[in-house]
Amino acid sequence: MAGNMKRKTPMMTIEMLPVRPPPCYHLPMRILVAEDDARLRSHLVGALQSAGHTTDQTGDGEEALWLLGEHDYGAAILDIMMPGKDGVSVTRAVRARGSQLIILLATARGDLRDKISGLDAGADDYLVKPFSTEEMLARLRACERRRRPELGNIVRVADLELDLKARTANRGGAEILLTNREFSLLEALAEASPRPVSKTTLIERVWDQYFDSGTNVVNVYVNYLRRKIDTEGLSPLIHTVRGVGFVLREEKP
């Protein structure tokens, strides 16, 4: 556990999240989230955990650089403005070591010079705040696909097929017309399949908001999807898990 590691200088608290079964269209990775805003950091970690990744976290650039030298991460999400050492400097130092992990730089500054300096330092992509967790996950997947083209863009659950690049869906070969929001919701359910996804996670992933217990927006959109996917004569794929949320999977009679 990262929380039990020792070093000469004091360490930030690092939370180790449990390993989940791999999502159906990307490989699970150990990802470092380095962000000095604790609330945002927790938000990002939660989304990554829901996507099946194991995550360490810190709010300090020096800590991030040390961790990246100690562990074999698949990716890192680095805030460009952190105490200790900025994200661009961390990226440059990591690349100088020969590391090929995926690096996403996040910043509130959208200046072209910042983007150029980060990319020239070796970052794979850039996120300008405010950004959605959905965008972050999509950019990670895109980086994975560029490095591992065999992962592809197609997700299948039973006879339901999603093309993540074209953002299209079909069931049994018949095209399903979905709005952008409906597709994002279906993508989140497919990503976790056959595990259930909580309403809280869906709100944060699809609507990029913190959960409001008074809202029924998830139920409304799940019903939209059911009308389009679980049509008459087909076995239902979208199921309610009482006390948890929803799951996309084929259930045997």
Image (spheres, rainbow, N blue to C red):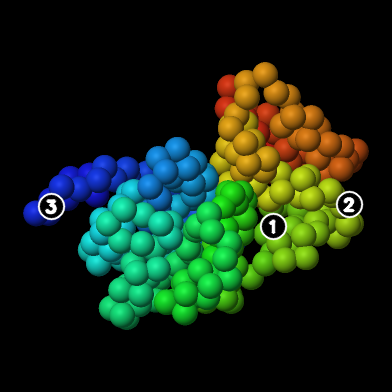
Mark 3 is surrounded, within 10 Å at the Cα level, by few (under 14), some (14 to 19) or many (20 or more) other residues, namely few
Q: Real-space Cα distance between discs 1 and 2?
A: 17 Å
Q: Position of residue 125 (x, y in %)?
A: 54, 69
Above or below: residue 177 compared with residue 152: above
Q: Position of residue 14 (x, y in %)?
A: 29, 45
| Callout 3 touching callout 2 (CB < 8 Å) | no
Mark 1 is surrounded, within 10 Å at the Cα level, by few (under 14), some (14 to 19) or many (20 or more) other residues, namely some
Mark nearer the viewer, 1 or 3? 3
Residue name at image x 61 percent, y 59 percent: 138
In the image, taking residue 219 as reference, residue 126 lies left or right, namely: left
Quickly name the residue at label 3. Answer: 9
Of the residues shown, which amino acid type is indicated by label 3?
Answer: Thr
| Callout 1 touching callout 2 (CB < 8 Å) | no
Quickly name the residue at label 2. Answer: 177
* Quadrant assignment for the C terminus: top right
Q: Real-space Cα distance between discs 1 and 3?
A: 48 Å
Of the residues shown, which amino acid type is indicated by label 2?
Answer: Leu
Dot 3 or dot 2: first in sequence order is 3
Residue name at image x 77 percent, y 60 percent: 167
Mark 2 is surrounded, within 10 Å at the Cα level, by few (under 14), some (14 to 19) or many (20 or more) other residues, namely few
Above or below: residue 137 compared with residue 241: below
- SS of the residue at dot 1? strand
- SS of the residue at dot 3? loop
Q: Position of residue 178 (x, y in %)?
A: 84, 49
Q: Is residue 1 visible?
A: no
Marking on residue 156: 1
Residue name at image x 37 percent, y 44 percent: 17
